[in-house]
Amino acid sequence: MTSTAAYLTLATSAGNIVITVHTAAAPQTTQYVRELAEAGRFDGAAFYRSTNFGVDSRRPLIQGGPLAPLFTGSGAPIPAVDLLEAVESTGATGLAHVRGTVSLARDLFSTGHVLPELFICLDDYPELDAGGRTEPDIVGFPAFGSVTTGLDVVASIAAMETNGASAVERLAGEVLTKPVSIYRATFETRPPESSI
């Protein structure tokens, strides 16, 4: 039987996060993530955001990627990256934003294109699915994977202090005081040895 999953391992300064990537359900998104990882676009990036969108009873999600300098105003150079025009909505893939889901951010300020920015949910976020609260459309965000190992690492990042500087007003109070480095992202078609 042919495998319909692959694996993305993020080696971070807080520990490793292993993600099962749903290649059959979200082929365009996973190919985009694979190309980014193999080109080293996530290497040297950071998780820099923790938010629950104002719902205090809900566990937050974390966000990170190579565009951290754009959102945090750190002064570091912003890398040139390709955006993905096609958005594979959860309505098409059958995936949903639940605890452990890994998805990609979108440029909701202008084009709506998919950004090379990962976010990981620690709770259910149905408003991020197709038909949810996404503006200016209701396409939602392209979920593509699930955390297999390291959800405790995600939780530890989400619990970090968020007094960091923000270059975007709507992220005020959500930027980590000390962003968590992503040393390396590895895309594999078989489970990493550390997760077997």
Image (cartoon, rainbow, N blue to C red):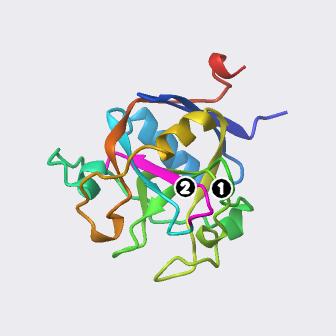
**Percent x, y of residue 120:** 55, 49
Residue 150 drawn in magenta: no
Label 1: few (<14), some (14–19) or many (≥20) C-alpha neighbours in 10 Å: some
Asked if disc 1 and disc 2 are in contact, CB closer than 8 Å, the reply is: yes
Q: Residue at x 69, y 57 (%)?
A: 98
Q: Quarter of the image containing the C terminus? A: top right
Q: Which residue appears farthest toward the right when viewing the image?
A: 1
Number of numbered discs present?
2
At 43% from the left and 43% from the top, the residue drawn is: 160
Residue 147 location, quadrant? top right
Q: From which residue to which does the magenta span run? A: 56-67
Q: Is residue 145 above or below residue 83?
A: above
Location of mark 1 (residue) = 123
Q: Quick one: quadrant of the N terminus?
A: top right
Q: Going by the image, does 170 lie left or right of 155?
A: left
Task: Give how far across and how far down residue 179 sits, in percent.
Answer: 34, 41
Specify the label residue 60 is tagged with.
Answer: 2
Could you tell whether 166 is left or right of 130 in the image? left
Question: Circle 2: is it few (<14), some (14-19), or many (20+) Cα within 10 Å?
Answer: many
Amino acid type indicated by mark 1: Asp
Give whichever of 154, 102 is nearer the camera: 154
192 relative to 124, above or below: above
Compute the Cα span from label 1 to label 2: 7 Å
Tell me: residue 73, above or below residue 134: above
Judge whether residue 192 can be spotted in this image: yes
